[in-house]
Image (cartoon, rainbow, N blue to C red):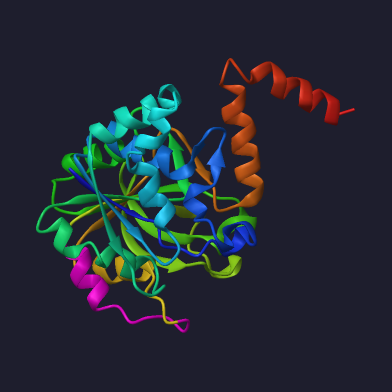
Amino acid sequence: MKVVIPAAGLGRRFLPATKSMPKEMLPVVDRPVIHYVVEEAVAAGATNIVIITGRGKRAVEDYFDHNPDLGSIGEARELEELEALTRKVSIYYIRQRMPKGLANAIHCAKHFVGHEPFGVLLGDTINVCTPPLLEQLKTRFTELGGKYSVLSVESVPDSKVKDYGIVQGHEVAPGVLEVERMVEKPRLEDAPSRLGITGAYFLTPSIFRAIEETAPDATGETQLTTALNTLAHQEKVYAVTFQGRRYDIGDRAIWLRTNIEFAMRNPALREAVLAALREYGR
């Protein structure tokens, strides 16, 4: 299975930290966000991954590359898990030359993908799911006939509707909607539902034609939600709920909370974190 990981965004919500560091390299405990994303893709069965990068993203490539200097000074033990991960998959890189939106970033992978369905995971989102979220989507894709794109959705609070692509559709099976339309970041009063697109997809190559037929918005970016809306008028598109939890690391508060939660799961850190929380809670 091929998986596309868009990681070319500018990370404006984390400025000034992301002025010179990719947001995908923000640490969650002891590894960057994109490590978890690649880990999920591999766990879901990915054999080939292409990461869509942009200006200032060289650190992403360096992270997954071998560094013989670290091994030579006796620090290789801490890198064994990363080395093991990179041996399980072939990772490629394509550069998005200008920030033209998520749909454009995915379109950069057109020749890499070819004529087969493929997964998409965002480079700044961690999904903690069993089975892996992308595997759940692929299973749904197969159950629904193996011909139509599938995207993950979850209920979002009213205060977050404006931050999501929102889906309207009719239920065809428990947890499965056939999409009728999608609205990108609507006002609450204009939202057709409270189902937000979470940023994990299992797409058919038809998406590339839909992206090519979708006009950029007022900012010059081509939105994936708009392209999927185009596709939904040409063929079926399904939205599915999933089992598990998603962490949007693009949000500073969620990033901080995610660090605490993940540290609490680490036996070597749990007591220290609890002690700090008790101290600050006084």
Any part of residue 229 in sight: no
Q: Magenta segment: does it hold 229?
A: no
In this picture, residue 254 sits left or right of residue 147: right
Residue at the (26%, 72%) spot, across then down = 211
Q: Magenta segment: does it hold 217?
A: yes
Q: Is residue 23 above or below residue 19?
A: above
Q: Is residue 9 above or below residue 155?
A: below
Residue at the (57%, 33%) spot, across then down = 29
Image: magenta residue range = 205-219
Q: Residue furthest left?
A: 115
Nearer-the-camera pick, 138 or 181: 138
User: Where in the figure is residue 35, as x and y percent of width and height?
Assistant: 41, 39
User: Where in the figure is residue 129, as x and y percent of width and height?
Assistant: 41, 31
Nearer-the-camera pick, 22 or 134: 22
Nearer-the-camera pick, 130 or 265: 265
In this picture, residue 209 sits left or right of residue 72: left
Q: Total number of numbered labels?
A: 0
Quadrant including the C terminus:
top right
Q: Is residue 136 above or below residue 51?
A: above
Residue at the (35%, 42%) spot, across then down = 64
